[in-house]
Amino acid sequence: MKHLLEISDLTPEEILRIFSLTEDLKEKTSAGIREPLLPGRVMAMIFEKPSLRTRVSFQSGMAHLGGSSMMLGDDVGFGKRESIEDFTRVLSEYVDVIVFRAKQHSIVQRVAEAASCSVINGLTELAHPCQALADLYTLREKVGTLEGAKLAWVGDANNVARSLAVCCGRLGVEFSLACPSGYEFPTKFVSTLHEQCPGVQFSQTSDPHEAVLDAAAVYTDVWASMGQEAEKEKRKKDFAPYQVNQELMSSAPDKALFMHCLPAHRGEEVTDEVIDSPNSVVVEQAANRMHVQKGVLAWLLGVHS
Ligand code: CP
Ligand code: NVA
């Protein structure tokens, strides 16, 4: 059974296959064609945290493909009425794929282990693989070729940063992280990254100006992710020198894109001037979530693998 819990579940060839399905489906969507690759297929979604992009892009994408989807709410009693394993074994008798946004990564892993259908991680505290795929698809659309490009991440080394670092490693993109001391990726993550992506070009620095030099794109995300609300004020102080503003962007090449997974906290990790600038591709990234996830669904459900 194929699952997508982390980018490391995909080989570089599989990522490129998903991108090629995406390209085809996106072109057809633009031409008004909704290719029904998944008629009769059913997707269940369980979200333990809020979402606009992931939830709606998956549901619209599945509708485009001729399948249907259902959002399961609190009333199904996930984790409350019965064991997670019993719940999952039963749910996967009814549906073809489960998209799960969980408070704990270990819960999505348990669901995938118990499921007899495919499971897609719709964000955990450790990974956001669908976001990373859409981001690198967007970067490729904008710069033409990924091999040798550099992506600078300025801010918290969070779930999105982790998935992007692995996706960059898989696709030959240099990844440069700038964050305050104490907020870097854990050593274990970095050593696993090197094992999973031999030859990866990866660096960490506390100097954001150094990180953005020669970057094709400068990426940031909120300083306190969902679940870290208690640390919000401390993080605001610690990350203040890492705001992506025009001064920082002037250390990057003129053509450098600005990227953000959204939702953004304007005035904190990014200024209005940068996020609203012509170099900002944040809406294209969000739009590509749907196109790439259609590629993921078509690939994962074995229709066009
Ligand atoms: N970027 C992203 O995953 O957004 P949502 O939290 O709105 O799904
Ligand atoms: N890092 C953010 C991403 C939201 C899409 C969070 O986990 O809240």
Image (cartoon, rainbow, N blue to C red):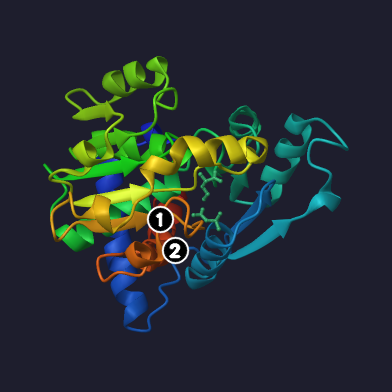
Q: Is residue 218 above or below residue 199?
A: below
Under circle 2, the secondary element is helix
The residue pinned by badge 2 equals: 290
Q: Evaluate whether residue 299 shows in this view.
A: yes
For image coordinates 75% across by 41% down, the residue present is 90
Residue 301 % position (x, y): 47, 50
Q: Which mark is residue 270?
A: 1
- Separation of marks 1 and 2 at Cα, in angstroms: 24 Å
Mark 1: which secondary structure? Answer: loop
Mark 2 Cα-neighbour bin, 10 Å: few <14, some 14–19, many ≥20: many
Left or right: 75 as drawn, with respect to 273: right
Q: Amino acid at mark 1?
A: Val
Residue extending farthest right: 81
Residue sitting at x 34%, y 68%: 25
Residue 116 seen in the current view:
no
Position in image of residue 70 (x %, y %): 68, 61
Q: Nearer the viewer, residue 205 or 227?
A: 205
